[in-house]
Image (cartoon, rainbow, N blue to C red):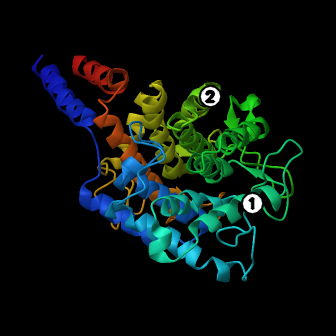
Amino acid sequence: MRKAARHFLAVSLLFHGLSAAQNLTDDQLSQVKQRLAEGALQSWELGTRAQALTELDTSAYSVLTVDASLPPSQSSPPSSLDEVFGIAKSVVGNRSVSNDHASGAQPLIADSAAGDPASIGVAVLLANWTGQASQDKLDYAGAATDQLNYLFNDVPHTSDGAISHRVSQLQLWSDFVYMVPPFLSYYGVVTSNQSMLQQGYNQIKLYRQYLRDGSAGGLWKHIVMGSGTDEGHWSTGNAWAAAGMLRVLGTISRSQFANNLKGEQSDLSSWVSEIHSAMYPHMRSSKLFGNYADDNSTFDDASSATLLASTVYRLALLSGNTTFLPQAEQVRQAIFGPATSSGSNNGSSLEHFTSDMWLTPVVNPHSFGDEGSESPEGQAFVVELDAAWRDWVQAGSPGVNSAHATARASWCLWVVIPMVLVAVV
């Protein structure tokens, strides 16, 4: 009997530690941001970094913050936006050289991907909106308009209007949903153009028609059309799509045209949940996803798990849908939690970070079929998860009871019952 009691006491203490909120310290998060700053060089990495910093450091200017005004204040932007403005300034200031001194419609950065440069567009629009143009002597408005015109006039389109993610050929990538639609919708808000605001939604709707795989439970394919396709269900691609949808949902819901676009908001919320429903059944015992969600032969990937978990917290705040909070909490606690006794041989006290706070394991951001060692986009996803969880907690942790109930049930199934059987024997 005493042996059984000791087992139950140990279980109780361990469960208390499990249910306690895992989170990064300020110093750890600062290191994550520093690695992100060092590593973000490509167009989509710069755009994702700008978005992540806005969500974490200046939430009042983020489209995902439920009670923030949109468009935001035009006067006296806080210094916490300086890094975001620094990205916009560097990109627009070097645009002429990058694009071989072109004039008129052109991307913000020369890139073989048509969609990726647009990911920086929200930062450029925000810089223009808050008056940085007069301070920096740069034409932010013109740069944003040139990027917009480039997408609609120079980039290939499908017959029904889906903008290609590539320049050289008509090709649709799941990544596109994070890169382009949020820019289109934000452009519509700051220019009071409902048609452009709705374009963000329209592009998502079109991409979903082409990429959603009904035969795979609603998982999204990665790349369709053209040469070099990848019809596998890339986990990061599914997370990119869900995160892009939420940014458009947040933009529309707080825009001056919100009442006119209630059906679009309902669709976007439903489509994000649809991806959650397709992805989470494939979550592994590690609480990560395989690089390809339904391919058990692929390596564990923390990048996709991190970004997708952030979208669960955001969906709970934007639409009240808390269905997958238990899974998101399991992922967050696993990724931000301490190293296990078996260790991960990364020299860190955290299971999924190296000693200098690079997220691990991750997909190679420049070769999506291979495991990598350092992923700037993965670092941005860590920042976005931390910001999403913080905002969820500050809002009263809606849905937390179901998350805790699931955690308790899982703990009893896998730990308590086996311990009791051992004690009895």
* Contact, mark 2 vs mark 1 (Cβ under 8 Å): no
Number of marks in the rendered image: 2
Classify residue 266 as left or right of residue 331.
Answer: right
Is 400 rendered above or below residue 340? Answer: above
How far across and how far down the image is residue 155, in percent? 81, 60
The image quarter containing residue 150 is bottom right
Q: On residue 59, which mark appears?
A: none
Mark 2 sits on what residue? 260
- Image quarter where the C terminus lies is top left
Q: SS for tag 1?
A: helix
Disc 1 crowd rating (10 Å Cα; few below 14, some 14-19, many 20+) is some
**Mark 2 or mark 1: whose residue is earlier in sequence:** 1
As drawn, the residue found furthest toward the right would be 159
Identified by mark 1, the residue type is Asn
Residue in the picture at 17% in, 20% down: 4
Is 104 rendered above or below residue 204? Answer: below
How far across and how far down the image is residue 347, in percent? 32, 64
Q: Is residue 205 visible?
A: yes
Q: Nearer the viewer, residue 103 or 87?
A: 103
Classify residue 406 as left or right of residue 300.
Answer: left
Residue in the picture at 46% in, 64% down: 131
Disc 2 crowd rating (10 Å Cα; few below 14, some 14-19, many 20+) is few
Q: On residue 149, which mark appears?
A: 1
Is 47 rendered above or below residue 304? Answer: below
Q: Nearer the viewer, residue 280 or 86?
A: 86
Q: SS for tag 2?
A: helix
Identified by mark 2, the residue type is Asn
The image quarter containing residue 419 is top left
